[in-house]
Image (cartoon, rainbow, N blue to C red):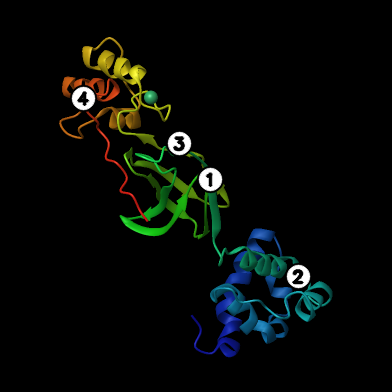
């Protein structure tokens, strides 16, 4: 921003910024000794603009200076504090994970949790009972959980601070979202297809779309019935690893 931080800081940082702060604080910026505080402009500039920069004087001479010499110290403290609040390290996003239990055949109990921005994966982590993603800059994202034989679940999330979001992933066919597939799901799906009790939850509808095409219909219901009764299987076995 500044070619020469020291020389340019006075008008660029303190001139306009302090004037705006003065207005916010109801102070008189004209009485502030701006020239005297410009000596530390480079540190202030770096604090604001450089990721991870720690102002070596922020808590010592400069703090002392603004605390004793400057009638406008409140505004400048605010300036430093605001700069410190800029999350150069980002925030943490975490929560619990509800998922099908590992069974050694179709489910391994390990899910992938990804943070996505504009269709691009920002971060990803494997998770079992919980997940944690750190270094998340404030923004809106899709938090996606995926796993073997499960239906990928997307959550819209806005990160403005450390954030907790508990998430769930369910197997293909889990129409009632209890992470298990059994005759209850067949009933739920059949009732939906018949029209006697509609599934309204968007994720439950995805789970009920057993064959993954043409929405939820009698074919899904039949496939799920055959799966639950052992006639055929809608999941793929996890390959054995050595
Ligand atoms: Ca179920």
Q: Circle 2 sits in a helix, a strand or a loop, which is it?
A: helix
Q: How many marks?
A: 4
Identify residue for label 3: 101
Identify residue for label 1: 130
Asked if residue 198 shows in the view, the reply is no
Mark 1, Cα crowd under 10 Å, few <14 / some 14-19 / many 20+, is some
Q: Nearer the viewer, mark 4 or mark 1?
A: 4
How far apart are labels 2 and 1 at the CA level?
45 Å
Residue 39, picture quadrant: bottom right
Q: Is residue 106 left or right of residue 58?
A: left
Mark 3, Cα crowd under 10 Å, few <14 / some 14-19 / many 20+, is some
Asked if residue 42 shows in the view, the reply is yes
Q: Circle 4 sits in a helix, a strand or a loop, which is it?
A: helix
Q: Is residue 4 left or right of residue 220?
A: right
Report the front residue among 17 and 90. Answer: 90
How far apart are labels 4 and 1 at the CA level?
32 Å
Find residue 73 and name its label: 2
N-terminal of the pair, mark 2 or mark 1, is 2
Q: Circle 3 sits in a helix, a strand or a loop, which is it?
A: loop
Disc 1 residue: CB within 8 Å of ligand 1: no
Residue 38 percent location from the top left of the image:
67, 84
Q: Nearer the viewer, mark 1 or mark 3?
A: 3
Q: Circle 1 sits in a helix, a strand or a loop, which is it?
A: strand
Q: Nearer the viewer, mark 2 or mark 1?
A: 1
Point 33% across, 42% down: residue: 152
Q: Nearer the viewer, mark 4 or mark 2?
A: 4
Find residue 146 and name its label: none
N-terminal of the pair, mark 1 or mark 3, is 3
Identify residue for label 4: 223
């Amino acid at each position: 921003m500044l070619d020469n931080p020291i020389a340019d800081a006075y008008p660029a940082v303190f001139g306009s910024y302090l004037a705006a702060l003065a207005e916010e604080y109801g102070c008189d910026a004209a009485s502030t000794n701006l020239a005297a505080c410009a000596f530390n402009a480079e540190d202030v500039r770096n604090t604001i603009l450089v990721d991870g920069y720690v102002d070596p004087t922020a808590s010592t001479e400069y703090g002392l200076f603004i605390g004793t010499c400057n009638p406008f110290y409140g505004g400048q403290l605010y300036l430093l504090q605001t700069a410190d609040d800029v999350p150069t390290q980002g925030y943490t996003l975490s929560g619990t994970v509800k998922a099908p239990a590992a069974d050694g055949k179709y489910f391994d109990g390990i899910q992938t949790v990804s943070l996505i921005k504009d269709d691009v994966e920002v971060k990803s982590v494997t998770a079992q009972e919980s997940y944690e993603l750190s270094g998340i800059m404030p923004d809106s994202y899709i938090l996606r959980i995926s796993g073997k034989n499960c239906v990928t679940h997307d959550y819209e999330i806005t990160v403005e601070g450390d954030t907790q979001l508990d998430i769930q992933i369910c197997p293909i066919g889990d129409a009632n979202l209890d992470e298990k597939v059994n005759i209850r799901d067949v009933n739920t799906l059949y009732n939906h297809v018949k029209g006697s009790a509609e599934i309204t939850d968007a994720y439950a509808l995805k789970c009920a779309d057993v064959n993954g095409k043409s929405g939820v219909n009698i074919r899904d219901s039949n496939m799920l019935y055959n799966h639950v009764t052992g006639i055929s299987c809608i999941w793929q076995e996890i390959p054995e690893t050595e």
